Amino acid sequence: MSVLPLLDIGLALLVVAVAAWTIAARNLFASVLGYVAYGLLLALVWVRLHAPDIALTEAAVGGGVTGVLLVTAGKRLDALKATRSGAGPGLRERIVAGALSALVAGALAFVVASLPTPAPSLAPQAAAAAAGPGAGLGNPITAVLISYRAFDTMLEKIVLLLAVLGIWSVGADDAWGSAPAPLRRARPDGAMVLLARILAPIGALIGVHIFWVGADAPGGAFQGGALLAAMWMVAMMARLLEAPRIGSRALRLALISGPAVFLTVGLAGNILAGSFFAFPPGFAKPLILFIEAFMVLSVAVALPMMVAGPPDGESKP
């Protein structure tokens, strides 16, 4: 038996152990740290499953952006608990929740174990169509997301936009139009500033590269946008940059640019290619890159604004 299967088994056991520890942890901050570690381990799992696109997304979002979002939300939740008192879920509710979770996990395991070997798949036909003259894409993941699941992919960006609007809506009325509160109230130490000055430019360059190669290699708009968003958040945590005012027209145009351009190109398909979200032969690849460029912008702006939170009245000009 080679070493790799043993490492895979160890990785699988470690993922399950970290997941169980994250659920059982009593401290909120410890749970968030466990969740971040769980996301990074899942990224390694996707690499071992030869799915680098999903691994990039998991590392950037599951292990990075979401972790910062949960830490920020946890701090605000602690501040809210300090002003309110209430009992948590009782033993009966916890038992019911645990039983339902075990039932769902068992059902999913049964379905996965019951799949035929080899499983039926249209992957060869999809890969052949993606590499053909109609699409001109070498990355089947991008081809599926933009060509086969274009409407669903556009709606995912709209969900991000609605999430940002929902976060903004919980702000006070007199704070509307102002900027969110800084991610750090005080100036951070020199180490954080140095890290941001070194990491942010390199990470931004890698994010642009991942977007650009996404048509032919692992990467794409969401992965590149998530990395750019993470670098912006690092700069905000170092107080090198501040979150913009939510009333900024440039900010709002950046948020809607991805879904708006996506929908515009999709509607143009009715005229140029004969159907909704269809691409004219020979122009599919440049149009997809054009769409993804604005998707990168929307993702890179939406994720940091979700972490920054609602507008803060103290930052109102």
Image: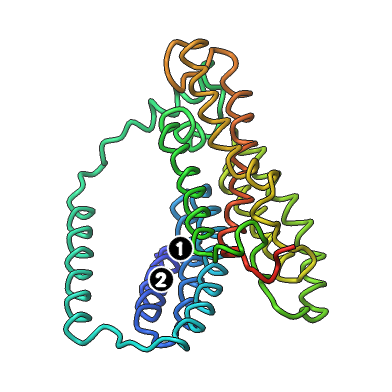
- Three-letter residue code for mark 1: Leu
Q: CA distance from mark 2 to mark 1?
A: 7 Å
* Residue 90 shows up from this direction: yes
Q: Is residue 153 above or below residue 227?
A: above
Residue occupying the point 47% across, 37% down: 154
For the image, the number of numbered tags is: 2
- Image quadrant holding the N terminus, namely bottom left
Q: Mark 2 = which residue?
A: 15
Judge from the rendering whether residue 67 lies leftward or rightward of residue 108; answer left or right.
right
> Residue at horizontal 68%, vertical 44%?
249
Residue at (55%, 33%) from the top-left corner? 260
Image height of 52 relative to 230, above or below: above
Q: Amino acid at mark 2?
A: Val
Give x and y (percent) for residue 69. 54, 67
Q: Are marks 2 and 1 in contact (CB under 8 Å)?
A: yes
Q: Residue 225: horizontal and vertical position, in percent?
A: 62, 48
The percent coordinates of residue 120 (x first, y second) are: 26, 36
Which residue is located at x 17 percent, y 76 percent? 96
Q: Is residue 259 left or right of residue 113?
A: right
Q: Is residue 202 above or below residue 222?
A: below
Q: Secondary structure at mark 1?
A: helix
Residue nearest the observer in this picture, 309 or 123: 309
Q: Secondary structure at mark 2?
A: helix
Q: Which circle's residue, 2 or 1, is located before the other in the chain?
A: 2
Give residue 23's mark: none
The residue to which callout 1 is attached is 42
How packed is label 1: few (under 14 Cα within 10 Å), some, or many (20 or more)?
many
* Residue 126 occupies quadrant: top left
Q: Nearer the viewer, residue 232 or 109?
A: 232
Camera sees residue 217: no
Q: Nearer the viewer, residue 66 or 207?
A: 66
Q: Where is residue 187, by image quadrant? A: bottom right
